[in-house]
Image (cartoon, helix red, strand yellow):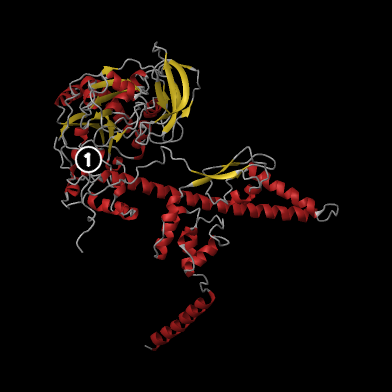
Amino acid sequence: MKLFPVRGGIHPDYRKEQTSEKAIVALPMPPLLFIPLQQHVGAPAQLLVSAGELVKKGQMIALCQGTISASQHAPTSGRIAEIAEVAAPHPSGLPQTTIIIEPDGKDEWADLPEPIADPFAADPQVIRDRVAQAGIVGMGGAVFPAAVKLNLGTQYKIETLLVNGAECEPYVTCDDRVMREYADEVIDGARIVARVMGAPKVVVGIERNKPQAIDAMTKAAAAFAEVEVVGVPALYPMGYAHELILAITGRETPAGKRTAEVGVVAYNVCTVRAVHQAVRFGRPLISRVVTVSGGAIREPKNVLAPIGTRIADLVEFCGGFATRPESIVNGGPMMGEPLPTLEAPVVKGTAGILALTAEEINSRPASPCIRCGNCVTICPCGLSPVEISAFVRKDNFEGAAKMGVMDCVSCGSCAWVCPSHIPLVHYFNYAKGMLNDLERERRKNERVKTLAEARIIRLEKAAEAKRAALAARKPSPENTPSGNGSEAATATTEEKVNA
Amino acid sequence: MLIAISSLTVMGIVLGSLLGAAARFLAVQENPLEEELKAMLPGSQCGQCGYVGCSQYAAALARGDTSVTLCAPGGKAVVEALAKKLGVTADLSELEEKGPEYAFIIEGLCIGCTRCIRECSVDAILGANKLMHSVIAEACHSCGKCVKVCPTDAIVMVPVRVTLANWHWPKPEVEHIQSKPKVGYAH
């Protein structure tokens, strides 16, 4: 297949050999599981269980609410020990509402929904409902609810379903292992998703530094004419959906638009495999493969961990720390974020946990910009990091927004390539946060205005009603004006309570 | 020739007098800037700026009589919008110290007098006579008027909690090496 040139990109040291030849091993059931209500983009799921309740494996314990949300399920059978605030796997370490399950060791399945006998003959809506029921979210890191994404097929004409197996982050090999060991399941899931989307073509994009994965997937796809497996150049950030789509189809997604606009939708390999499990076996998303790696980990591994495993338990399973880690990273070294605590759980979007040594991080103080322009050359989004960072340094967020800071995907290439070690991505993340804050404030002010206007109308109506009541009572002389006044005041408050 | 001249003359007179009449009878009394500024303000008429309401503050701003930093509920976003519209630089240092807040009713102290309910310009307080009141935090725009009227000091302003939904990275602290001249630098 002919590939198209992409914009920018870097060649970091991949360091995947620490785990790429390690087969996936299942983690023995940890003593406690911590299931946060929110592991996805959108609204947190609604709690369905209470402390002390017994749950079975695969039972729904939190229900999605609102249009963009995902349900949570019990990864094993056991007792709900507590509903508590537990540190989230997030750089802030802030707590979030979490269901704590004490496994009973029986690992007993709940009554699962019936497998869909022939997903290629079934109504697409049935499959969409099943995916929603299984609580599947994008497992490549974006954690967008998969069922909501499946609806794109009804709004846009999708020509190609892109299965994203690029896995461009250094160290991380979970997608690589899943493709090698479960190629048939990935292909089946991809075909199901393509059918729901109405996409006639499936393209699996894999970076060429994973030849075994390409072989396994090509073999699994051989029987299906509509599926094509393509090796793409090993270039970071090839796994960024817009970049991969550009490489494979030559189409560029407009800024701020969905990839569906150019007729392509991308799904991570683990996500389509989860769809396969939900459709073929009725199993919800209750575990995932996590790469535990980095120089400070004694035995790096690819671990099949139940959702909710404490990261400390995961690290312990991998032999603990060989040396003192300088930083624990959630995700890959390029886009991952530091974890302030090991008490946080593995969630649906956790692809890797890295314990990096000081040499691996190679952190240095920033020196002045030398105007080399490398950051501009390598930016996959076509931005000018040097100029944006100058605006952000001055807290000129409007200027930064005009230069396209909101189109930055925080891939980290600019900071990686910067010879002066300027924390460019950190500046952009800060600017994006501030711009979001300002937007929130603006929306709130608009709401305040609506509320204030509504109140004025309400008060006018109340005054009108009062006048009308007064006029109605005037003929009868026994009603005193003072009595009138207090009654009307109560009416106002009552009306407010009712409203 | 004559028809053309006369028709154009008639048209000129008619249209000219129409324009003259329009200028007199449809004249815009208000400063258009005032309207624009008013639209930017929260419109909750809380009066914390020291003016009676948002329109009066907007009028004062349009005349250039007052500072753009007086709107407490509007926060930084409004100050910045006003400063940009008026082409002035706003001193944001005071605003940045005080983050977003909302009113909170200490339930044990509330006697259900409904004074705060009547004061609230956005109907953010729920309650009734002799029943405990409560603030809908999402609707509160932190004008603080309810705090002033509460006879039992049951209302306090509390900062909006930082959650996973609104947390973001702080500004990186970059100390550029050799960026400052050493003491005793040659003049």
Q: Secondary structure at mark 1?
A: helix
Residue depicted at x 43% and y 31%: A96
Residue depicted at x 41% and y 39%: B165
Q: Residue furthest top?
A: A106
Instruction: Judge whether residue A120 can be spotted in this image.
Output: no
- Percent across and percent down for residue A134 are 39, 24
Residue type at tag 1: Glu
Instruction: Judge whether residue A412 can be spotted in this image.
Output: yes
Q: Is residue A54 left or right of residue A376?
A: right
- Percent across and percent down for residue A417 are 18, 43
Q: Which residue is mark 1?
A: A243
Q: Chain of mark 1?
A: A
Give the quadrant of the N terminus of chain A: top left
Q: Is residue A409 left or right of residue A101?
A: left
Q: Nearer the viewer, residue A313 or A29?
A: A313
Q: Is residue A344 left or right of residue A489?
A: left
- Percent across and percent down for residue B105 are 59, 42
Query: Above or below — where is A406 with respect to A116?
Result: below
